[in-house]
Amino acid sequence: MLGLERYFIFMGSKEVHTTPRHAGLAYEDVWFQASDGVRLNGWFIPAPNARATFLWCHGNAGTIADRVDNIQRLHHLIGVNVFIFDYRGYGQSDGTPSEAGLYRDAEAARTWLLARPEIAGTRLVYFGRSLGSAVAVELARRHPPDGLIIETPFTSIADMARLMFPWVPVGPLLRMRFDSLKKIPSIHVPLLIVHGDRDSLVPHTMGQRLFEAANPPKRLYTVPGADHNDTYLVGGTAYFAELQRFLESL
């Protein structure tokens, strides 16, 4: 069952087909270790005079390379430092993905980032998309940041399994939980939830449920017409303005 779970949950690639340099961004190729010794890879993209630093936990498919366009827009339109990393088993990172493993990876990324002099004086914000939203929620529960942004988040893997396989009683058999709905009431940091109202993978109602369970200060920003992976494209200027407002509120 665990192998089947991994097949459906983790859809990473090993191909890193581009880098921030191809988008005109200076960056540092970073190698660091998780607490269990797994070697991980990421990119640190600094921004001049940044007032915030994003620790980015990406979704379940692809690699950090698939986020370069999004990183470029964040860099140009908001001016934040970005540290994005590949989970174990993704991209150039070693190992095999698991729920506990992804949490270890995020903690290791945070430890590496906090040692960087470039982030001194900036607000540390965890930015998690899709599966990464669950990783960011767990990291925020263990190590509260200055702010938390979760985009296109799901409530739990069990809820997603019931949605995708309504005819199969898989819930009791699942070993991985990624249960953000259970965890989010224990988090007490400023929160922004971003969700498209036409998300065909994770229903907008899941973002609403997380918002209702969360503590203030909080905001649910709905991107009209956006699906699961195009919130920043469909949202355009208004999307980035919303992120900027959140950062200025910290």
Image (spheres, rainbow, N blue to C red):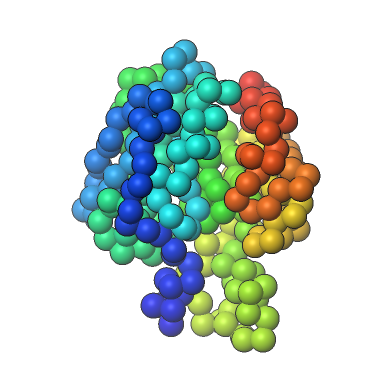
Q: List x then y, in percent, for residue 73.
A: 54, 30
Closest to the observer, 54 or 238 = 238
Quarter occupied by residue 189: top right
Residue at x 55% of width, y 48% of height: 129
**Rendered position, 89 above or below 26:** below
Q: List x then y, in percent, for residue 21.
A: 35, 30
Q: List x then y, in percent, for residue 202.
A: 66, 60
Q: Is residue 193 left or right of residue 135?
A: right
Residue at x 71% of width, y 48% of height: 226
Closest to the observer, 115 or 12 = 12
**Rendered position, 119 above or below 90:** above
**Count of numbered marks:** 0
Q: Is residue 231 left or right of residue 31?
A: right
**Rendered position, 83 above or below 128:** above
Residue at x 38% of width, y 32% of height: 22
Q: For residue 213, say whether it is visible.
A: no
Q: Is residue 49 left or right of residue 170?
A: left
Figure quadrant of the C terminus:
top right
Q: For residue 223, say whether it is visible.
A: yes
Quarter occupied by residue 42: top left
Figure quadrant of the N terminus:
bottom left
Residue at x 64% of width, y 25% of height: 244
Q: Is residue 75 left or right of residue 12?
A: right
Instruction: Name the residue at the top extreme.
Output: 49
**Rendered position, 237 above or below 169:** above
